């Protein structure tokens, strides 16, 4: 598997390269978004890791430009910023998921493996869809592949779960899961169940609506 790391911090580049090489993957690196686009256009990649804060072209712009080159490659964003509004901007630009800094090797390896596996499943069973349908998912920041992953978990486990629990169970970052749960709520596929705690505020749980 080939991994492309786009990060202006050479020490983080080195660390990520070491983690990926330990997992047995080939690694290409780029120092900024523009260089990353050139490397991807020339060599391609199976998974791309993109830093958020970079000079000239930040991570959001880089993700958007990468999506113009390839609509399907998994793009994982590396960031210390956990704000949902930032996550939404990245997902709308075409990001697949997030890896929060400081990066932990086991988490990063499992996350890359998950998205590579999901991408391969999509490639092995391609679905025809109109350009109009494709545009809807791009503008909403929703990937059919990731949506199916979240939906399958909720559909298979009919009990209510918190976003945090779903995140841990399916291997996606919290901001990603939250975005997709909100989409499923809008679509009428899941419902909110308020769980009243003995201590603290009530917690929202989410459950698939029985077909």
Image (tube, rainbow, N blue to C red):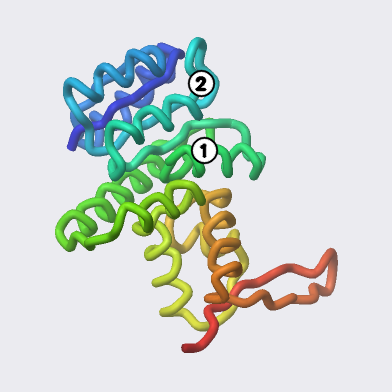
C-beta proximity under 8 Å, tags 2 and 1: no
Q: CA distance from mark 2 to mark 1?
A: 11 Å
Quadrant in the rendering for residue 105: top left
Give the residue pinned by disc 2: 58
Q: Which secondary structure, mark 1?
A: helix
Query: Is the residue marked by circle 2 packed among few (<14), some (14-19), or many (20+) residues within 10 Å?
Result: some
Query: What residue lies at 22% left-to-right and 23% top-to-bottom?
Result: 41
Name of the residue lying farthest toward the bottom = 211
Where 171 sits versus 12, above or below?
below
Q: Nearer the viewer, residue 187 or 90?
A: 187
- Residue 190 coordinates in the image, percent (x, y): 56, 75
Q: Position of residue 114 (x, y in %)?
A: 32, 52
Rendered position, 144 above or below 84: below
Q: Residue 211: percent from the left, percent from the top?
A: 47, 88
| Quarter residue 42 falls in | top left
Number of on-image labels: 2
Is disc 1 surrounded by few (<14), some (14 to 19) or many (20+) residues within 10 Å? many
The residue located at (40%, 18%) in the rendering is 33
The disc at residue 90 is: 1
Q: Residue at x 51, y 11 (%)?
A: 55
Q: Earlier in the sequence, mark 2 or mark 1?
A: 2
Where, quadrant-wise, is the N terminus in this rendering? Answer: top left
Q: Residue at x 27, y 37 (%)?
A: 70
Q: Where residue 130 sits: x, y (%)?
A: 29, 58
Task: Say the numbered circle drawn on residue 49.
Answer: none
């Amino acid at each position: 598997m080939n991994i492309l790391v786009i990060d202006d911090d050479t020490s983080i580049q080195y660390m990520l390269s070491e983690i990926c090489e330990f997992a047995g993957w080939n690694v290409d690196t780029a120092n900024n978004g523009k260089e990353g686009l050139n490397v991807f256009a020339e060599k391609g990649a199976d998974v791309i890791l993109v830093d958020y804060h970079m000079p000239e072209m930040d991570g959001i712009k880089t993700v958007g430009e990468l999506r113009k080159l390839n609509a399907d490659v998994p793009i994982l964003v590396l960031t210390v910023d956990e704000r949902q509004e930032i996550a939404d901007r990245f997902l709308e630009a075409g990001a697949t998921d997030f890896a929060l800094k400081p990066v932990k090797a086991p988490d990063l390896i499992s996350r890359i493996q998950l998205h590579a596996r999901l991408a391969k499943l999509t490639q092995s069973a391609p679905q025809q869809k109109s350009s109009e349908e494709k545009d809807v998912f791009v503008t909403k920041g929703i990937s059919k592949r990731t949506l199916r992953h979240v939906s399958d978990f909720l559909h298979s486990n009919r009990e209510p779960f918190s976003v945090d629990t779903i995140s841990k169970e399916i291997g996606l970052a919290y901001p990603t899961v939250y975005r997709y749960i909100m989409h499923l709520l809008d679509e009428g596929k899941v419902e909110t169940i308020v769980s009243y705690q003995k201590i603290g505020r009530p917690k929202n749980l989410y459950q698939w609506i029985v077909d």
